[in-house]
Image (tube, rainbow, N blue to C red):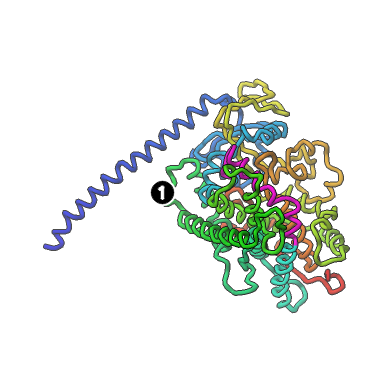
Amino acid sequence: MAAASLVPNLSSTARVLAQIAAPITATFVGYSLFHAFQIWYRDWTSPLHGMKGPPNPSWLLGNFREMNLDFWLPHRWRQEYGRTFLFRGLFSIPELHVADVKALSHIMAHGEIYERSDASRAAARRLLGSSLITLTAGDHHRQRRIMNPAFGVPQIRAITEIFVEKSNALCEVWSRAVDSNTTGTGTEVEVLSGLRQMTLDVIGLAGFGYDFDALQLKSNKSSELNDVFTELFHSPKANLYGLVRVAQGTIPVLSLLPLPGWLTLLTARLKLDRIGAEIVRKSKDLIRRRGANKKSAAISGAQRDILSVLLKANLSEGIPESQRMSDAEVVAQIPLFFLAGHETTSTAAAWIMHCLSYNPLIQAKLRAELLALDTSTPTMDELNRLPYLEAVIRETLRLHAPVVFVQRTAMQDDVLPLGEAYVDKQGREFTSLGIRKGQTIHIPIWAVNNDPEIWGSDVAEFKPERWTTLPDAVNSIPGIWANLLTFAAGPHNCIGFRFSLAELKILLFAILRTFEISPALPEGSIGPVVAGLLQRPAVISDKEAKGSGLPVILKRLNADEEGI
């Protein structure tokens, strides 16, 4: 009797669920069809409709996946379609691939026309909140003006001691692992994880005056923030998580679905927001106690971190009240600083160690230059005067730019000048392109930095000596640093590039005066794995199972070789 009485209730529940599910399903189907029609209509009516480009292998993924798997693919496409061509992004949205340096110079110089794409800003906002890279036009200019002093040369000089302290701390951690091996042949160490811990500690202290102790020098407890970033960017699922964020940025209604990584992303945002709010509150309290908003205040002690400088700049008399950043806007920058100062710098450092491990003569030459510096605590100016150190970093960031590409969206109709004419499907030649408002531009940082027609036929070689006699064509690349696109250019360039370069130089100074680096695996065993926009080193045979990582052999230098 009881069982029979449950049947009507179950049937009633099923009917209610069906009534709820039907309109939701219809809404998603209708939205998808409408979105598909928009893509088709914009493509069919676009002035770029007649452009050549590779075939579309997937309506859902477009060419996105194959481009992430093969960095040289755009080079092969360029040989067939030219430097400027159309390909398909997620959901088959047409994107304009631009590797023409004249066109790139125009795009970078006109930041008011070519903003970060709506999809990339929405994807970044899901992880980082309303930070600098998610803003456009006036808000971006307003916040950038306030934040610039915090990343200027005087400020980087003021925090150099932190770079030295944490670089030496990382070497101590690795030394314990190396010294435990008594054979004297060196010890295999997975260095990317240590580099990530070190750069997190650096951005904590130099960025916010906050000690994360990610290197676990004070306790055996791992940093919760480091654990979150590991899951988001270094696990085998990292690329899937990045793909989901971009998809949700492209079609916002997908954000309503519990797609893979949603719980990890939510956890990350909650932790970032909580830690960020706590950091800002403590920093503001300290500034108030010390009267740091007065003109006579100097950068010293606990006030030398980037956040304190930013907060003081925000209180400056030169900034009108209406132009100042709110507490919420300041807190929103914290996750961006974490990502930019932690993930990208550690990735760059790992690639440098990778390149040096397979090039012992270059490593020895660089070590000799570093050992010639008669100090264990170099200043930024002393390191900036070392030409081979500069060349090694430039060459690595050319070959292995952590950010593979960036996107821009045309905010208004424009005409894009071309240095190399393109021929459309009908055989007509054009020296400029008509760009319609809303068109997505794909800027292939890696492809331009590795273009053999710009850099020469030896472009794939790790060759720091090339920086003494560069081809004239390199001067046309519109980069903010070293004629590379690595840190972009224009109003949307990387605000923290000086911070990153100083940290890399001091880190190399400490590592190469302590260790000899050798490869742990045969050449060709390490390759890039892409998660979102970042590419990191990984063991090719294990990257699907373990994610990113870089094993090398570390051996302590002899006492007469080691820097004291």
Count of picture labels: 1
Residue depicted at x 63% and y 56%: 307
The quadrant holding residue 22 is top left
Residue 502, can we see it?
yes
Question: Under tag 1, what secondary structure?
Answer: loop
Q: Dot 1, how many residues are within 10 Å of its Cα: few (below 14), some (14-19), or many (20+)?
A: few
Amino acid at pointer 1: Leu
Per the image, the residue denoted by label 1 is 257
Counting from the top left corner in percent of width and height, residue 292 is at 66, 57
Q: Nearer the viewer, residue 335 or 39?
A: 335
- Asked if the stretch drawn in magenta spans residue 59, the answer is no
Against 205, is 109 above or below?
above
Q: Residue at x 63, y 46 (%)?
A: 70
**Magenta segment includes 139:** yes
Residue at 53% in and 58% down: 277
Q: Quadrant of the N terminus?
A: bottom left
View extreme (left): residue: 1
Q: Is residue 235 visible?
A: no
Residue 408 or residue 502, whichever sits in front: 502
Q: Quadrant of the C terminus?
A: bottom right
Give the percent coordinates (x, y) of residue 334: 58, 55
Q: Which residues are magenta?
A: 133-160
Report the side of 509 relative to 88 (left or right). Answer: right
Image quarter for residue 210?
A: bottom right
Residue 550, horizontal then vertical, whole percent: 67, 61
The residue at 17%/56% (across/down) is: 7
- Residue 312 x %, y %: 65, 53
Q: Main secondary structure of the magenta part?
A: helix
